[in-house]
Image (cartoon, rainbow, N blue to C red):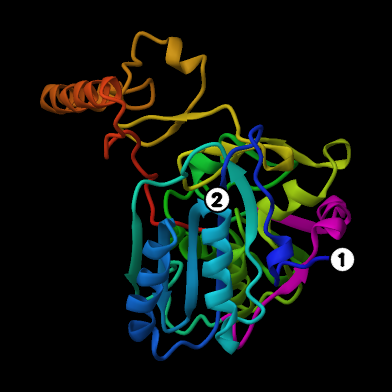
Amino acid sequence: MATNLNEDSIPQVDSSSGPFVVAALYKFVSLPDFEQIKPVLEQVCHANEIVGTLLLAAEGINGTVSGPRDGIVALMKHLWADSRFADLAPKYSLSPEQAFIRMKVKLKKEIVTMGKEGIDPNRLVGRYVPPKDWNALISDPDTLVIDTRNDYEYAIGTFEHAVDPQTTTFRQFPAWVETNLKSLPAEKRPKKIAMFCTGGIRCEKATAFMLEQGFDEVYHLQGGILKYLEEVPEEESLWKGECFVFDQRVSVTHGLQVGHYDLCHACRMPITDEEKQSDKYIQGVGCPHCYDSLTEDQKQRFGERQKQIRLAQARNERHIGRKMPPRETTEA
């Protein structure tokens, strides 16, 4: 059986699901030479027509990229050749078009920004729970299930009975824990805490933080929602809705099929077909979530941008601003 650690695990493309492979990957690992890794990684990506974002920091690598299958194979072989990435196991899916516009390799202080010093999943981390065992854990009445993603992600899909911390960035998660969980007397604290996110990186770092705060039984979904939607049959699934992704697909459903959401160019919120029927939806300008808060200058500028997009499409060109990335840097 193929694993995520060889070429055979990278899906074959076909006309029905698209010619591009999307690879979401991360690994917490000591990379003291992360600055030196950047130019070589950029070269490999550009040479293989790969686009997306990769983040490098002393604590590891994180990102999502898209490209032709041969290009993704070349990138993964390059990474696997480094012993520190030998067990790097991406989550793969298919896209009918390039999921990003350009390639960026960024140097960061953290590969996922919590803003708390000393939180190191390489040293202390919660218990990994594979997708096949996740339903049993979150169905246990002694388990508090926490969605560590942001409010706009939670809004379009989450697990049954999951708590929404109502954060707009991952930086706010520690404060939410301080206010809502750490302040509880010991006898009222949840016996088990199960956390999840898109690809596993935020909930993995969150478990390290929770253990630092004195919580004992802390679990997280291995491979994140993406792996769950890939492996757990829809008829057995406890997932409701769609999963927001940080690329041009906007969302995916069970089996990692492209979802039904679009993205507002102004506020970068996921929007439904129903919301696009609103008088406050103007393509490329605004949507019901943001229209009333936009200034007239912003509406004019966004309108001009949309005009340039239409002109580029008429010339059969891809305008660089056709879609904007979501609020935060790529988060697996």
Q: Which residue does the image show at 36% across and 22% down from the upper left?
A: 287
- Please state if 155 lies on the left or on the right of 283 as rendered: right
Amino acid at pointer 2: Pro
Quarter-of-image position of residue 3:
bottom right
Residue 329, compared with residue 16, is above or below; it is: below
In the rendering, at what x and y percent does residue 282 appear? 31, 16
User: Residue 286 or 81: which is nearer the viewer?
Assistant: 81
Q: Which residue is mark 2?
A: 165
> In the image, which disc is placed on residue 1?
1
Q: Quadrant of residue 300?
A: top left
The quarter of the picture where the N terminus appears is bottom right
Q: Is residue 168 visible?
A: yes
Q: Badge 2: how crowded within 10 Å, few (<14), some, or many (20+)?
A: some
Residue furthest out toward the left: 297
Position of residue 330 in the picture relative to residue 160 (left or right): left
Residue 167: give its label: none
Q: Residue at x 39, y 44 (%)?
A: 326
Contact between labelled residues 2 and 1, with CB atoms less than 8 Å apart? no
The foreground one among 12 and 186 is 12
Residue 230 point in image, percent of width and height: 75, 49
Range covered by the magenta-colored residues: 121-146
Q: Position of residue 271 (x, y in %)?
A: 47, 26
Q: Tell me which residue sits at (60%, 79%) in the image.
A: 80
Q: Nearer the viewer, mark 1 or mark 2?
A: 1
Magenta stretch contains residue 136: yes
Q: Is residue 301 left or right of residue 135?
A: left
Disc 1, SS: loop
The amino acid type found where label 1 is placed reads Met
Indicate the secondary structure of the residue bearing disc 2: loop
